[in-house]
Amino acid sequence: MTITPLDDYPLHQTPLPIAQMATADPNHYDRYWFNGYSTDGDWYFGVAMGVYPNRGVIDGAFSLLRDGKQRSVFASGRAPLDRRDTHIGFMHIDVIEPLRENRVRVEADHLGITADLVWRPRTMAIEEPRQTIIRGGSVMLDTTRLTQWGTWEGRVTVDGVTLDVDPRTNRGTKDRSWGVRPVGDQVTTAPSTTMPGIAFFWSPVHFADRCTHAMLFENSDGTRLSSSAASVPVLKEGDAVWGDERAVKRGYEPMYKIRWRSGTRRMEEGTFLFNYPDGTTEELTYEPLLDFQMKGLGYTHPEWGHGRWHGEYKEGTEGWNAADLDLLNITNFHCQQVCRVRCGDDLGIGVVEQLVIGPHAPTGLTDFMGGAT
């Protein structure tokens, strides 16, 4: 047993100390994730930090896409027992005020990237429905996520070129998730008797007076594993950032159409239809402006994949030209596209995250790794 300072707070949900997990599942994780992008689609950055208590690992990454070039820095090491210690090497995510202000610092000048950024919300934080996927009798995914829309202020410097980040001309999303999902090196099990396949779409959008969100997990045949939709008002002076959600308009079973770019698994145009319990609907159309590779934050990265033990401390950097990527390499399937979004007369800006592995009947993908025809 290990007592840490957090045990002095009334936070416990089991008889165990905070530092000891209630589950021994090595895939248990707790994660920060943010994005930020300009309202004209000129640049995008992503921030990620994950703690994997049963693996004893913490890792983080920062990545900027600008002028067709994406540059990333990565850090990984031994996880601290005190969960308030949210830094690894050159990377810090500070909770200045919960759900109201975060500060992200990247002090990796020796790797060519520095950043000092403050996140502030435009909306309250909302909880997405719990996402649970069971395959072959085993839990593959069981997570909870909060989503919150906001802005950034500060600066990012990459290879000597500084980007000033003005809250009036950028938008972003905060994503905090925790639970179980496949991270790090997996234990050996009997081979699956079914072809693996998954489709994931996640789509937070900013409009002038509200923000919207659609999330879908599907099997290869299009059957739903989890889905949600919501319209969330922009905060007014004095509004709470958590708690009473009566102003949030929750939808159900969002429908969609995706048209892929020929020969890829990358969206050319998308439409989501939100259905609300009062019988109203709204249709959002997405036009991609910019493609960000999620491997720049470790997702499906062959070396910097999440939760891997690299020793007491390891750091690194990587970059590429977007035009040179092989989009049918599986490490490039997972992306976020910054999109112009129309809903009636309203014009917004947001992202559509997409990861489709295997065939996907609703969007016309017919084999495991091939592109749209």
Image (spheres, rainbow, N blue to C red):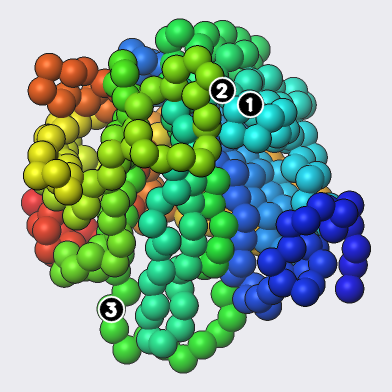
Q: Residue at label 1?
A: 101
**Depth check, front residue: 262 or 156:** 156
Residue in the image at 12% along x and 17% along y:
345
Q: Amino acid at mark 1?
A: Glu
**Pointers 1 and 2 in contact (C-beta within 8 Å):** yes
**Pointers 3 and 2 in contact (C-beta within 8 Å):** no
Name the spot of residue 363 as percent of width and height, x first. 13, 54
Badge 2 element:
strand
- Whether residue 188 is situated above or below residue 207 in the rendered picture: below
In space, the residues marked 1 and 2 are separated at their CA atoms by 5 Å
Q: Residue at label 3?
A: 195
Which image quadrant for residue 283? top left
In space, the residues marked 1 and 3 are separated at their CA atoms by 43 Å
Judge left or right: residue 150 versus residue 272: right
Judge left or right: residue 213 versus residue 316: left
Q: Amino acid at mark 2?
A: Arg
In space, the residues marked 3 and 2 are separated at their CA atoms by 43 Å
Q: Residue at label 2?
A: 120
